Amino acid sequence: MYDTFSLINVCPQNANLNSGLWNSIEMDCRSWARRFGDIYIICGPIFMNREHEAIGVNKVLVPEAFFKVVLCLNGKPKGIGFIVRNTDGTKKRDLYYNSIDQVERITGMDFFPALPDDIEDVVEATADINDWN
């Protein structure tokens, strides 16, 4: 946990997003970890293919969006992804649910390549919030 509280792990995020929608997604993740035990969470910025806003004297780049993917292998394996634009984040939360495959397509990353293909194919293709509630 110490490593997550360093400046190397910081991205400029809209204040309303950070205290609103993103915070509620993070609270969901903590709740799921308590409920399901071990879960895997990967998150980060998304920079679109265009010129980026830069802020401050050090010209820190501002991401256009953020992603988070969550995987649980306890019980029936399940996964879910989120993509949130770096704005106020005032739309209904269910508009942000994505499959992990969708997040991989947008980010260009392969999040769980070590999973056996039969599990990876199913877990990454579906995103049913009811599996998590």
Image: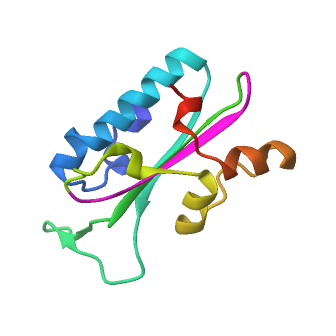
Q: How did the renderer colour the structure?
A: rainbow
Q: Is residue 116 visible?
A: no
81 in the magenta segment: yes
Q: Nearer the viewer, residue 126 or 19?
A: 126
User: Is 40 displayed left or right of 87 in the figure?
Assistant: right
Look at the picture and state if 59 lies above or below 103.
below
| Residue pictured at 43% horizontal, 24% vertical | 30
Which residue sits furthest left?
57
**x, y percentage for residue 105?**
59, 67
For residue 65, side relative to residue 132 (left or right)? left
Residue 19 visible, this angle:
yes
- Magenta highlight: main SS: strand
Image coords of residue 14 (percent x, y):
20, 54
For the point 62% across and 23% down, the residue is: 38
Depicted 110 relative to depicted 79: above or below: below
Q: What percent of the width, then of the height, locates residue 107?
A: 53, 65
Residue appearing at x 52%, y 22% in the figure: 33
In the picture, the quarter occupied by the N terminus is: top left
Q: Left or right of 19: which side holds 132? A: right
User: Which one is in front, 62 or 71?
Assistant: 71
Residue range corresponding to the magenta coloring:
75-87
- Relative image position of residue 122 (x, y in whole percent): 76, 46
Total numbered labels placed on residues in the image? 0
Occupied quadrant, residue 70 = top right
Image quadrant of residue 84?
A: bottom left
Q: Is residue 69 above or below residue 1?
A: below
Q: Is residue 29 magenta?
A: no
